[in-house]
Image (spheres, helix red, strand yellow):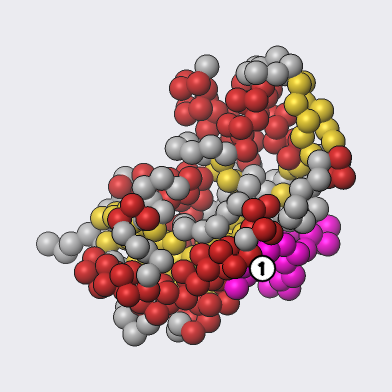
């Protein structure tokens, strides 16, 4: 009997996406193994290489990253060490093997100057340290054979297992009568459970290259907050404010909606609209546990 394919999920213990990937893999024919900082000095290239050799996975999903966007502006070298340096270590560890790598990236690799969704062929032009380090992580994969890796760009994650924008908004609304939310940044809200399923499908197809994987439609942060508050039936007012009224250290793209045409073409799956995914997250997972 053929053994189940083995997947190593970096960040699978506690990460927002990592936990969703573990759940999806455990419900499939895969053998899923989580791996993270609690398992040792994963930033040490020799330690990492030894562990990967011992586990001998068929594929690695890397969800480990520096994601604190504003803090990256103050600690660029640390952000680069994780978002590029760690990826380089992974590349070193699997070069010359048959192990495939799925690397996650971000809408922050774009400058937000477009008015239509970004495709995988659009030129990257990050304007924040976070975006630059994530793009550098993408570029670090270039020394591998093209068929050995897959880059999945995603955005605006929400889902169970860890604090996210939606849970933060609803928790704030339990304590206040009103909240201020930025209305002039538009992107692609994404449910981690959906992202995990798309990732699994791409892995099963041994897809390579760059994919954009987000839920359908677009929203501002204010739109996402309003929909969350309405679905939760919370008596809290959402006040739209401009980015200028809510200054942040890192520059955010004003428009970073991602085009998922290539994902749909390769997998045969069109991502469902984000409001439907949000409804599932709130009604099945967040609200029963918090209200």
Between 285 and 261, the one nearer to me in the picture: 285
Is 120 magenta? The answer is yes
Locate the N terminus and report the quarter of the image it occupies: bottom left
- Label 1 secondary element: helix
User: Does 199 appear above or below 80?
Assistant: above
Magenta part mainly helix, strand or loop?
Answer: loop
Residue 122 pos. (x, y %): 72, 71
Residue to which mark 1 is pinned: 132
Q: How many marks?
A: 1
To which quarter of the image does residue 121 belong?
bottom right
Residue 144 pos. (x, y %): 45, 82
Residue 208 pos. (x, y %): 49, 72
To which quarter of the image does residue 259 belong?
bottom right
Is residue 269 shown to the viewer in this render? yes
* Magenta residues (range): 110-136
Is 176 magenta? The answer is no
User: Does 18 appear above or below 81?
Assistant: above
To which quarter of the image does residue 221 belong?
top right
Residue occupying image coordinates x 63% and y 47%: 156
User: Does 183 appear above or below 288?
Assistant: below
């Amino acid at each position: 009997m053929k053994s189940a394919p083995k997947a190593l999920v970096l960040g699978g213990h506690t990460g927002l996406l990592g936990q969703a990937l573990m759940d999806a893999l455990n419900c499939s024919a895969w053998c899923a193994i989580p791996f993270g900082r609690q398992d040792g000095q994963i930033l040490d290239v020799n330690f990492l290489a030894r562990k990967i050799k011992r586990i001998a996975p068929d594929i690695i999903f890397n969800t480990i990253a520096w994601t604190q966007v504003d803090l990256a502006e103050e600690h660029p070298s640390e952000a680069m060490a994780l978002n590029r340096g760690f990826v380089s270590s992974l590349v070193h560890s699997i070069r010359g093997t048959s192990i495939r790598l799925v690397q996650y990236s971000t809408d922050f690799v774009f400058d937000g100057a477009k008015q239509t969704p970004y495709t995988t062929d659009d030129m990257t032009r990050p304007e924040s340290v976070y975006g630059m380090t994530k793009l550098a992580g993408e570029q670090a994969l270039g020394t591998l054979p093209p068929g050995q890796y897959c880059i999945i760009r995603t955005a605006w994650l929400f889902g169970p297992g860890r604090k996210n924008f939606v849970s933060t908004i609803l928790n704030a609304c339990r304590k206040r009568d009103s909240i201020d939310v930025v209305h002039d940044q538009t992107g692609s809200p994404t449910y981690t459970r959906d992202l995990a399923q798309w990732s699994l499908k791409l892995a099963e197809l041994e897809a390579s290259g760059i994919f954009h994987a987000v839920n359908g439609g677009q929203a501002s942060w204010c739109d996402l907050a309003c929909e969350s508050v309405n679905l939760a039936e919370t008596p809290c007012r959402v006040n739209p404010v401009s980015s200028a009224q809510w200054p942040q250290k890192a520059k955010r793209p004003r428009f970073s909606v991602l085009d998922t045409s290539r994902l749909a073409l390769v997998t045969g799956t069109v991502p469902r609209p984000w409001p439907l995914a949000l409804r599932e997250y709130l009604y099945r997972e967040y609200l029963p546990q918090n209200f």
